[in-house]
Amino acid sequence: MKTSRRAFLASSASLLGGCSLFNIGYTPARRPVASERISLGVIGCGGMGWWNTKILLADPRVQVTVVCDVVAGNAQGRNEGGFYGYEWFRAQVDKYYDKPGCRVTPDWREVVADPTIDAVLIATSDHWHAKIAKEAMLKGKHVYCQKPLTLGINEGRELVRVAKMTGVTFQVGNQGRSESVKRVAAEIVRNGYLGECRTACVRIPGGPDCAYVGQRAKSTARGKVPEFFTPEGWKMYLGPSQHWENDAYIPAIHDARVWRCNYRTGNGITPDFGAHDVDTVQWAFGFDRSGPVAIENAKFSDWFEPREVLSWANTFSFDLVYADGRRCHVKSYDPKHGEPRSVTFNGSVGTLVEGLYSGQPVKLQLPPALKKWREKTDLKGSDIRFHAPKDGHPHEQDFIDGIYGGATATDCEIGHRTTSACLLATICQRLGVSRLEWDPVNEVFTGAHAAEANKLLDVPYLNGWSL
């Protein structure tokens, strides 16, 4: 006999002597049985939103029932600002299911308040992640949130707290964690098969002009808000972030994808790609639930003007230092010059290179002593083995496995710690310093420049919004 959500909550309240779970701060999340489908709401109808949604549409355990975006758009595709909009998403969902029925809304609050929705996919710009994810968890929704998890470090701390309190399944959209090559690389290093491994090097794309953003094609001129934004949609798009003078629209930071180039809505490329590659290092070194104790040798150059619009350096490098003395050197590269995106581990047995290329196969280059490494048989029984998605599921379906009771690849704590490590670099940029000391237990800066750096742990919530 199936129990409805309403009956379950009433039963829970009676067991608590009449104290409803709603009154202690949150709604419990539903855990469907194998015969039940998960009702999913999509918040953020953009590029990664569609990438994630395509995979979830193909999962017979999921029914996409509502899509949300601040832009309506049309059923034909992107508009001049590069936005898809919810009408195109609705058309694709209805086409996939071969019947109408997908609902739309411009307001994410309607999605998280809907008691028929079991889970949400959050694929908005970074400045909205924390607020939407927190409210969704408190309303009993399981959460898949795109990386980087938050705009500020204290936002991440709050999400970790709420995720633990509510017990929801929370998957951070770091697809690399579900790639077998990244897992194998981390397992080889963690279990000592590379010998003593004291250093790693991460190469990720550069700043606003990298091939993944194409910033120079975007105007930094301040103009009128395009007509595809309604006044209400524009207010919701900016949300808690600071408006520009005269409520200006700036294509270089307000068009689709490029919001990451200004600190009000994004933190540049470092946490965006570091969410994959710095994460691999912390996983392999055993610090994916804590993080570094310092950032050193931070250098930033090749800035674009005006700096108040284009906040982040195009070229950068820095070292993340861990409690046992190991180091992760992070540097930018220019993909137009043929340099590979990669993670390199330097061990006493040799060098292991893991390369994750957007749109290309993931590759693993092993040292000669490990050339015949077999993923499924070469680890010993006593070795540490990392989570592998069931049946080789992609990252999004691993999230669905978690809702039904399984483990997931990147929970809220892991996503937060990777984001935090990368945000140390953005804080160095904003302060103009080359070194900061970090306490990963209390999650505060110590030592020189600590007072100024700790002020940047929070991000401002404006326009009537609060976390």
Image (spheres, helix red, strand yellow):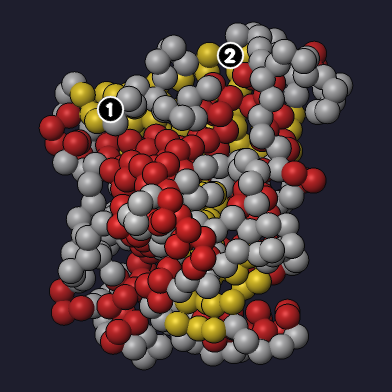
Q: Residue sitting at 26 percent across and 81 percent down?
A: 223
Within the image, what quadrant is residue 244 found in? Answer: bottom left
On the picture, is 40 further left or further right than 1? left
Does residue 463 sit above or below 202 in this rendering?
Answer: below
Q: Residue sitting at 46 percent across and 86 percent down?
A: 72
Residue 340: image x %, image y %?
62, 41
Q: Residue sitting at 37 percent across and 38 percent down?
A: 420
Residue 324: image x %, image y %?
44, 12
- Helix, strand or loop at label 2? It is strand
| Sequence-first tag of 2 and 1 | 2
Residue 9: image x %, image y %?
46, 61
On the picture, is 394 further left or further right than 14? right
Where is the N terminus found, in terms of image quarters? bottom right
**Mark 2: amino acid:** Cys
Q: Estimate how packed mark 1 is, as few (under 14), some (14 to 19) or many (20 or more) residues with alpha carbons within 10 Å.
A: few
Residue under numbered circle 2: 197
Does residue 350 sit above or below 26 in this rendering?
Answer: above
Q: Which residue of the protein is positioned furthest toward the left in this rendering? A: 451
Say which of 121 and 367 sits in front: 121
On the picture, is 250 further left or further right than 103? left
The dot on residue 5 is none
Residue under numbered circle 1: 442
**Mark 1: amino acid:** Asn
